Amino acid sequence: MQKIGVAGVGAIGGAVCRALTDNKIRQCTLHAISDLQDKPAFDVPNLDFEQLCTQCDIIVEALVPDAAPDLARTALTHGKTIIMISSAALLRFPDLLDLAEQSAGRILVPSGALSGIDGVNALHSMGITSATIRSTKKPMAYDGAPHIIDNDIDLTAITRPQCLFEGNALDAAKAFPANVNVAATLSLAALGPENTFVEVWADPAAPGNSHEIDVQGAYSSTKGRVDNRPDPDNPKTSMLAAHSIIATLKSMTEKVVIL
């Protein structure tokens, strides 16, 4: 059995913990969590990052953006595999990528709230010429983002679709660290953070969170759109994000895997 440690037991981490405790992931067991609050529903120890990475085989990261780098550094230093949903942290803190190359550990980035990353990975081997992503959420999903604060944007005053940001994935990760993990993930699979174009939109009429990708290659291209209902416990994210982590864990233990 693989001992799984989950850091951050909110909307995303909680869903992963439930899947583990309900025995929905083959040969994996929830060994411990790391959270600011005890979660008695899961009946496992609540450890600090160091203890979690020492005792567990695989670490699942579902933290607030600024906490993710410390966990990743600890996991990689201990030579552990870490599944990171906060992929924007990999753009903001590129030393994590260097550390992964130097350590015995690995970083696995799940598809999150996106679809079609498998096709983008295949396109990458043939050569990608352009990569674009457009994300749309309700205005208040961006509440507290640095870009909103720095530009004094009144989200409550938005009454129709409005583009809040245009730029590359690196700048988007700095502007919206809790909202653009999808853009960061696409950039890591495609042309890199400085060459992946991002649009961030706010739409008060949006039924949920939507992401549209357009990736052009030398021999093939792919376009896709995924519409997600926001997680009721965290409107900044989608329930699909949690289940992409669960799917990643399953792909590590199932006998037949579709990639």
Image (spheres, helix red, strand yellow):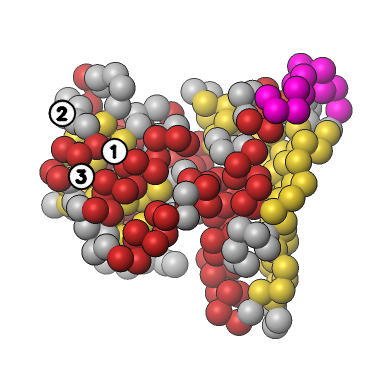
| Mark 2 or 3, closer to the camera | 3
User: Is 85 situated above or below 164?
Assistant: below
At 82% from the left and 17% from the top, the residue drawn is 157
Query: Which residue lies most toward the right here?
Result: 160
Query: Depth check: 219 or 167 in front?
Result: 167
**Residue 172 placed where, x, y %?**
65, 45
At 29% from the left and 19% from the top, the residue drawn is 37
Can you identify the residue that label 3 sits on?
A: 53
- Horizontal side of 215 relative to 248 (left or right) equals right
Can you identify the residue that label 2 sits on?
A: 45
Q: Quadrant of residue 35?
A: top left
User: Is 258 situated above or below 20?
Assistant: below
Which region shows up in magenta?
149-160
Residue 166 visible = yes
Can you identify the residue that label 1 sits on?
A: 6
N-terminal of the pair, mark 2 or mark 3, is 2
**In whole angstroms, how far apart are the C-alphas of marks 3 and 1?**
10 Å
As helix, strand or loop, the secondary structure at mark 3 comes to helix
| Mark 3 or 1, closer to the camera | 3
User: Is 77 situated above or below 243?
Assistant: below
Given the image, on which type of amino acid does mark 2 rest? Pro
At 75% from the left and 28% from the top, the residue drawn is 151
At 59% from the left and 63% from the top, the residue drawn is 192
State yes or no: residue 156 in magenta: yes
**In whole angstroms, how far apart are the C-alphas of marks 2 and 3?**
13 Å
Given the image, on which type of amino acid does mark 1 rest? Val
Other-residue count near label 2 (Cα within 10 Å), few / some / many at <14 / 14–19 / ≥20? some
Given the image, on which type of amino acid does mark 3 rest? Cys
**Residue 66 placed where, x, y %?**
45, 35
As helix, strand or loop, the secondary structure at mark 1 comes to strand
Other-residue count near label 1 (Cα within 10 Å), few / some / many at <14 / 14–19 / ≥20? many
